[in-house]
Image (cartoon, rainbow, N blue to C red):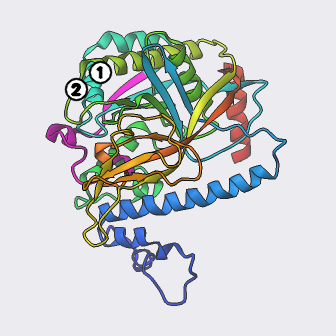
Amino acid sequence: MYYFTSLALSLNELEDGVAPTDSRRRPDQRLMEDGRWEEANAEKQRLEEKQRSARREREREAASQRTSEPIRRRCTSRELPGTLVRALRGPDHSEMEVDKVVHLPRLSRVAVCGGTHGNELSGVYLVKEMLKAKNVMKEEEEGHVSVLMVLSNPWAMQQCRRYVNTDLNRCFTHAALSGPVSKKDPYEMIRSKELNAMLGPKGSPEAVDLVCDLHNTTSNMGLCLIAYSDCDWICLHIFRYLQASTTVPTRSTMEIGPQPHGVVRSNIYTTMKYGVQHVLDWVRFYNSGTVFEGGFVDVYTMVKNIDYPRDGETRNITAAIHPQLQDRDFCLLHPEDPLFQTFSGETLRYKGKEPLYPFFINECAYYEKGIALSLARKRRVALPRIRVRAEQEQQANEQGFASEEE
């Protein structure tokens, strides 16, 4: 099969006497080996969230032992006149001095992707419109940046579905991308490899420098920028630039709502359109040598997801989001505040030990993932001054890498 040796084919098989930490014991891997993709995805998310929770607890304990040292994290949220712009950050944390200029590589290639989820239509129609507007590409190339517009999941778009076989967003792990291609693979697994060849390979020097992935949400989250690393100063400065605009709210995965899936609303589409244009404007200014001053932004760091109450036997949900919480994304949720209302009319209250900020409240696409809402902490993050690395610096840096490789 696929010209693999017998040894290669048997590497993931369980054996007697292996260590409890052996990766072959992971339940999500066993499910994937059995071809149960959806269950494998769900189990993988559960395990990763459990690992993140344990790491966050270790970090909190470490932070309490060094209170004299400032801890700078990354995420973002601000209000714009008349609109909302939020930025969220992933769970990883890092520290960095912010009182000096950070020189970063040029952003020569940018990808704007719509239709990763085929029923989130603002990004679909915006990318189609950008593909028709040939002068947009010319203008951006004059600004020393090449813009690639991509319709990520064509089959799902044709059917106006979130996905055909499995969530495309969950198909970009290194393991999935490096595996062999088979006609029996789910469509999104095949498509992820095509996108990786087009935009990557992932993690390689040939990969695009910035991906702006466009999404809609049914939650009342305004315009959000989602970034996944504390050291991603590019995305955070883009967010600050969008915040400073008096006309636009924003986000990088760019998530905008509320908008029902399978529907396009003019105001949401327009907000996304202006947001993308401002991102491209920022990239052009950055590549031309503009120095972006440091400062502070408020960020939201995800803490955990909360599932709906469920029947112990059928696993059907037994309650909905409480009316007092519905549509109050990024509004502080205190202990004992109403959280759910059961179908028999009982109010279930938030039993957490600290106030947190809810978001993705009652997101339609997350019912299948067992997520009623997510909770985050709000922090203030210090950003350094940044500018593009000069060509001489870039060449010296590349030579340094080459020397290290030798």
Q: Earlier in the sequence, mark 1 or mark 2?
A: 2
Q: Identify which residue, 61 or 255, lies in the foreground.
A: 61
Residue identifier under label 2? 264
State the residue lying farthest toward the right: 68
Which segment did they paint magenta? 147-170
Q: Position of residue 50 (x, y in %)?
A: 52, 61
Q: Secondary structure at mark 1?
A: helix
Residue type at tag 2: Val
Q: Is residue 404 magenta?
A: no
Q: Residue at x 24, y 52 (%)?
A: 187
Q: Position of residue 252 (x, y in %)?
A: 46, 30
Question: Would you say the residues marked 1 and 2 are in contact, meaning their CB atoms lie under 8 Å apart?
Answer: yes
State the residue lying farthest toward the left: 159
State the residue lying farthest toward the bottom: 16
Q: Position of residue 94 (x, y in %)?
A: 69, 43
Q: Horizontally, is 265 left or right of 150 in the view?
A: left
